[in-house]
Amino acid sequence: METTRRDLVMSILMGAVFVYALVESGDWSYRSALFPQVIGVAGLLCIAALLFVRLALKRVPAAEGADGRGDAADEARSPREEGRDALRFFGWLAGVLAGAVLIGQLAAMPLFVTLFLKTESRLGWRASVAAGAITWAILYGIFEMLLQITWLDGALWRWIGFP
């Protein structure tokens, strides 16, 4: 697992997004700033952990298989495969944003977790639905009940006249 320039560039770009979220939300009220600040700090910590793990793994010699070569998972992937993975990532991102706009944030987040785990991680339906339900319960419990921050309703509900 080698750290490539693409990994570093992506880490820098995402780090800039997280830093921007922290800086922009600095002057907001506590309730408004909580979500972007939590996401910003968590994102920066994840980037730091990812880079640390990749650098630490770089120093560990690769385990050799029975044929004397390195592990097949460590082989370089083609640019076409990496491009396909990037498009799939942006498709999921666009899907969760479109879902938040159409059906509302509180419904889109657990739906995203459920579908992502089912398709990308290939978990079973029970585990995926359970993870989605837990996600909904945590989001509802923290933001709706504890902090009393209401979620945005989806445009679909307004279009059909649902109260």
Image (cartoon, helix red, strand yellow):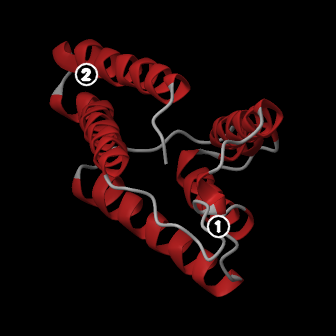
Residue displayed at 64% across by 36% down: 97
Within the image, what quadrant is residue 96 found in?
Answer: top right
Residue ID at (65%, 37%): 93
In the picture, the disc for residue 5 is: none
Dot 1 alpha-carbon crowd within 10 angstroms: few under 14, some 14 to 19, many 20 or more: few
Say what amino acid the circle numbered 2 marks: Leu
- The residue under label 1 is 121
Nearest the eye: 126 or 138: 126
Residue 160, percent from left and from top? 82, 44
Tell me which residue sits at (59%, 63%) in the image. Answer: 71
Q: Estimate the spatial distance between the alpha carbons at disc 1 and disc 2, rounded to whole Å.
A: 30 Å
Q: Position of residue 48 (x, y in %)?
A: 27, 37
Image x and y of residue 118, in percent: 70, 70
- Apparent side of residue 163 relative to residue 12 in the rendered image (left or right): right
Q: Name above or below for residue 94 compared with residue 109.
A: above
Depth check: 60 or 82 in front? 60
Marking on residue 22: 2
Is residue 160 left or right of 135 when viewed as pictured? right
Which secondary structure lies at badge 2?
A: helix
Give the image quarter of residue 33: top left
